[in-house]
Image: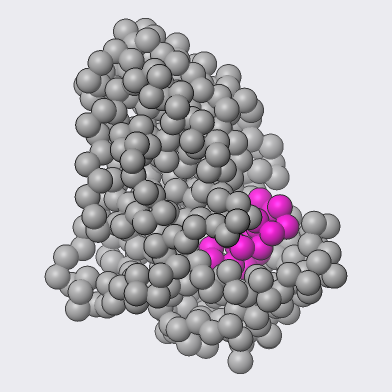
Amino acid sequence: MERPKYAFENPAVRLLYSISGASAIRGLQTIVVCPRVMIGIQAFNALGKNVRALAFSDRAMIITDKVVRVSGERVKENLVQAGFAVEIWDDALPEAPLENILRGAEVMRAHQPSVIVAVGGGSVIDTAKMVWLLYEKPDVDFRNLSPTAPLGLRKKAFLIGIPTTAGTGSEATSAAVITDGSHKIPLTHPELVPDIAVLDPRFTVSMPPQLTMWTGVDALAHAVGAYLTCNRASEYTDSFALQAIRLIFKYLPRAIEDGRDLEARQKMLVAANLAGMAFSNGAAGIDHALGHTIGKKFGLHHGLSVGVFLPYVCAFYARRLGRVDQLARELGYENGDEFIRALISFYESIGFAHYFFAYPQVKREAFEAAFDELVSWSLTDPCTAVAPVPITPDDYGKIIRSAFTGQLKGVMS
């Protein structure tokens, strides 16, 4: 049976996405939505007191997964000491499958919490957002979720995000990426921004080096993409993005080298949070449209997928937007080409391969067989609808092939 269509697949809605990014429209009103951000070890110690100030009742629910359940138990102990009756649901799954979200909503309706705490990586926090939405609004059709139509959340519960990775920034964003069938579906609404984000580096020290690298590269793609999507950017998002990039270049190598370096871990949490606020209040780049598609098709980690595409997207924009040169100068480089070379050198320094043929999941034969689908679904992704320049099938074809082979010159024409 054919999958039901989402609002962003409607041509009229996509046109509205484009029009709403016009400077004349954004000049009339720009709203910056962020959570209350609590940073550092003491922030977690004060969690119970802050949650108590929000709660309608003494019932709380923690959403996590089995991998980081131990972190969920730490949060439970904190909340129990503050007088809450706490339920832990540890069945969140990678990529936030729709069926899993529906099961979580059933559990939440049975427990009736007034506080929801998401403890985990991006998939866990995205799952919590959608479970919360269905708990508050059981009849909502989130396939037609409109960022401009009020939802009226927070009648039953508030949402708190405690990330155990430093990449998605989901604890600070209006976005949730779910999986419906064979496709990743990005959804967004300003009311999905959590009320509190707790950035405690102790929750991230167990990340292995490879996951640290992939999630860090995801945060880098968020920041660069938000800056380059200049039709959606503002003084706020530019500031968030630039500081995130600086922090990632400085602290990601340290976090990979020594996972127990608490300063590096905390700086990466801040970087991911800033990058999340940058794209949530602006837009993610087309590296995400491409990464959503190829990542789902070949079973690649999200951060790996978008990170590979990032240099090629920068090279594509460098011949079409002065914004790449502007980004380079803000970061101390002479021009966009020098920044792109520095980006690739940074990748090499942390051991990140910036071409897909380096990854065994992406076989050439399978890549060629899926090529037209990769182009087609990338064009459908909502990140394409808000791109700062028109994107054609040929444009995406060149970027995808270049990212497979590692040849930047393929997108520089």
Asked whether, in this view, residue 339 is left or right of residue 359, the answer is left
Question: In the figure, residue 25 lies in which quadrant?
Answer: bottom left
Majority secondary structure in the magenta region: helix
On the question of residue 375 being in view, the answer is yes
In front here: 83 or 294? 294
- In the image, is residue 336 part of the stretch drawn in magenta? no
Q: Residue at x 45, y 11 (%)?
A: 77
From the top left corner, tell me how far across and down residue 366 is, in percent. Answer: 81, 66
Residue 231 visible in this rendered orientation of the protein: no
Q: Magenta stretch: residue 293 in it?
A: yes
Instruction: Give coordinates of residue 206: x percent, y percent.
Output: 63, 30
Image quarter hosting the C terminus: bottom right
Q: Is residue 216 above or below residue 131?
A: below
Check the image and report above or below for 335 versus 99: below
Residue that appears at 83% across and 70% down: 364
Judge left or right: residue 256 versus residue 128. right
Q: In the image, which residues are magenta?
A: 288-310
Locate the N terminus and report the quarter of the image it occupies.
Answer: bottom right
Residue at horizontal 29 percent and vertical 77 percent from the top = 19
Residue 44 spot, x, y in % from top left: 40, 23
Foreground: 220 or 41?
A: 220
Q: In front: 29, or 320? A: 29
- Residue for point 46% across, 23% down: 107
Residue 239 sits in quarter: bottom left
